[in-house]
Amino acid sequence: MNSKDNQGPRTTFHMEALYSRKQMVQWLLGKGMVPRVKDNEGKTVMDFAGQNDQQDMLELLERWEAKQPVLRRKGCRSILEQT
């Protein structure tokens, strides 16, 4: 899930949000991925979703984030992201 693509420091999670693949983003969120974690360029998954004015993707991420405990909203990494 955290593997990088050939074009730079983007993770699978970042790319799925960029291309508005909602089902995959929902699956990744369910596996513990956090949309506020930054890539090597300092961009979050939410930044990638906002790049193409994908309001529905941003709303999905914001709704998910609003349901999370405070530590997760501040970008704390899940166990899956640390491996």
Image (cartoon, rainbow, N blue to C red):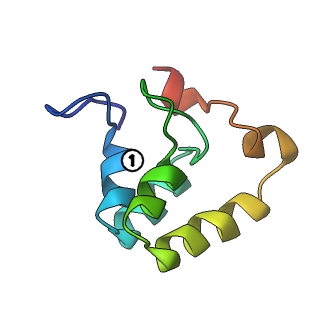
Identify the residue at horizontal 26%, vertical 30% (top origin): 4
Q: Is residue 30 above or below residue 5?
A: below
Q: Amino acid at mark 1?
A: Phe
- From the viewer's perspective, is residue 35 above or below residue 75? below
Going by the picture, which residue comes out furthest to the left? 6
Residue 19's place in the image compared with 1, above or below, is below
In the rendered view, would you say 43 is above or below 25?
above
Q: Position of residue 60 (x, y in %)?
A: 57, 72
Residue that protrudes farthest toward the bottom in the picture: 56
For the point 51% across and 77% down, which residue is it? 55
Q: Is residue 49 left or right of residue 30?
A: left
Q: Secondary structure at mark 1?
A: helix
Q: Is 54 left or right of 21, judged from the image as shown?
A: right
Figure quadrant of the N terminus: top left
Where residue 32 sits, quadrant-wise, is top right
Horizontally, residue 62 falls left or right of residue 3, namely right
Q: Quadrant of residue 16?
A: bottom left
Residue 51 is situated, as x and y percent measured from the top left of the image, at 40, 59
Front one among 77 and 15: 15
Please rate how many residues cluster around mark 1, counting C-alpha atoms within 10 Å: few if below 14, some from 14 to 19, many from 20: many
**Residue that badge 1 annotates:** 13
Where residue 7 appears, x then y in whole percent? 17, 34
* Residue at the image position 83 percent from the left and 49 percent from the top: 69
**Quarter of the image where the C terminus is located:** top left
Residue ID at (28%, 30%): 3
Q: Position of residue 23 (x, y in %)?
A: 38, 70
